[in-house]
Amino acid sequence: MDGDVRLLGIDDLGACQRLAEDREWGREDHKWRFLFAVGDVYGVEDGNGELAAAAVCTPYGEDVAAISMVLVAKRFERRGLGGRLMRHAMDNAGTASICLTATEYGRPLYERLGFRSVGLCTTYKGVSAGPSGRGVSVLVEATDMAAVHALDTEVFGADRSRLVDGLPSFCETLRVVRDETGIVGYGGAWRNDAEAVVGPVIAQDAETALTLVDEVVPEGPIRVDVDHRHPELTAWAGEHGLRPAFTTTVMEYGDPIANDPSRLFLPVAQALG
Ligand SMILES: CC(C)(COP(=O)(O)OP(=O)(O)OC[C@H]1O[C@@H](n2cnc3c(N)ncnc32)[C@H](O)[C@@H]1OP(=O)(O)O)[C@@H](O)C(=O)NCCC(=O)NCCS
């Protein structure tokens, strides 16, 4: 498969979803639309009107990019297509660092490209009884967004303006915790196919983070992506009857990212950091 790598548009959404289904991934309509809105989706045609491969790159200014949804159709795998698409996405990002979350299929490929493992992330799934908080957090207001943005940049280590601006419409629930100094945490949850994903959660400490999780979690099937550096979230998942579904490897490339993992409790999505 030697077609050119092409920047895809929202008209290619259906082809991306068929490719994802070919690898037993869900359709994830809401997530794909957000990825198209905030980043760059690349693909290689198969010559018959379908995609042979796709990958998403979401650059956050000049510092960090997140790469995700690296997919090669089964009929074209192990021919170097994944590697070619990754190099294209990495070159076009032009950032000092790149982050991603690797499946067991992707990890050897990323290691060959120079990515290093920085941690593990276990995805927990189960059925939630709904929010149980005491109303410490409040719904985000438009006037909070500048402070949410500042906190996000400080903790994530890069300017995610476009993504943060999109969170109030992407998330089903987006709440903040305030004290006399201002916003000390924000958290949300969003719909992905039949389940709700809990995240992002960024907060000054674990108590604030768990308060946010308790107050944004909706009733019904949920998914939570827990970085192993946050045992308090692993405990929360266990206490709420969630079960580990799979584990991925958190990887970085290039300069060390100037983030603060201790305050980065849950990603927006594994695809976005
Ligand atoms: C992970 C994935 C994208 C890799 O795509 P790919 O096109 O097969 O990747 P490549 O061909 O560049 O490399 C894969 C392997 O094929 C080998 N290869 C590359 N060109 C080859 C060729 N011409 N002949 C034989 N083998 C070849 C590579 O050396 C590599 O071998 P290794 O896995 O033993 O190290 C693909 O398997 C996939 O879509 N998996 C499901 C979705 C997924 O998990 N994606 C990763 C998300 S993080």
Image: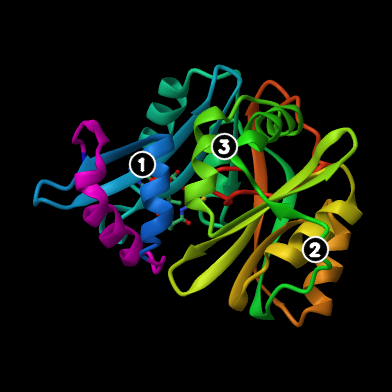
Q: Would you call the spot at circle 2 few (<14 residues within 10 Å), some (14-19), or many (20 or more)? A: few
Q: Which mark is residue 135?
A: 2
In this rendering, the label closer to the viewer, 2 or 1: 2
Q: Which mark is residue 36?
A: 1
Alpha carbons under labels 3 and 2: distance apart:
23 Å
Q: Earlier in the sequence, mark 2 or mark 1?
A: 1
**Residue 61 spot, x, y in % from top left:** 54, 20
Q: Which quadrant holds the C terminus?
A: top right
Q: Earlier in the sequence, mark 3 or mark 1?
A: 1
Which one is nearer the viewer's eye here, 212 or 30? 212
Q: Which quadrant holds the N terminus?
A: top left
Q: Residue flagged by tag 1: what amino acid is it?
A: Phe
Res 206 visible? yes
Q: Secondary structure at mark 2?
A: loop
Q: Which mark is residue 208?
A: none
Magenta residues span: 2-26
Q: Secondary structure at mark 3?
A: helix
Q: Which mark is residue 164?
A: 3
Alpha carbons under labels 2 and 1: distance apart:
34 Å
Which residue occupies 25% across, 38% down? 8
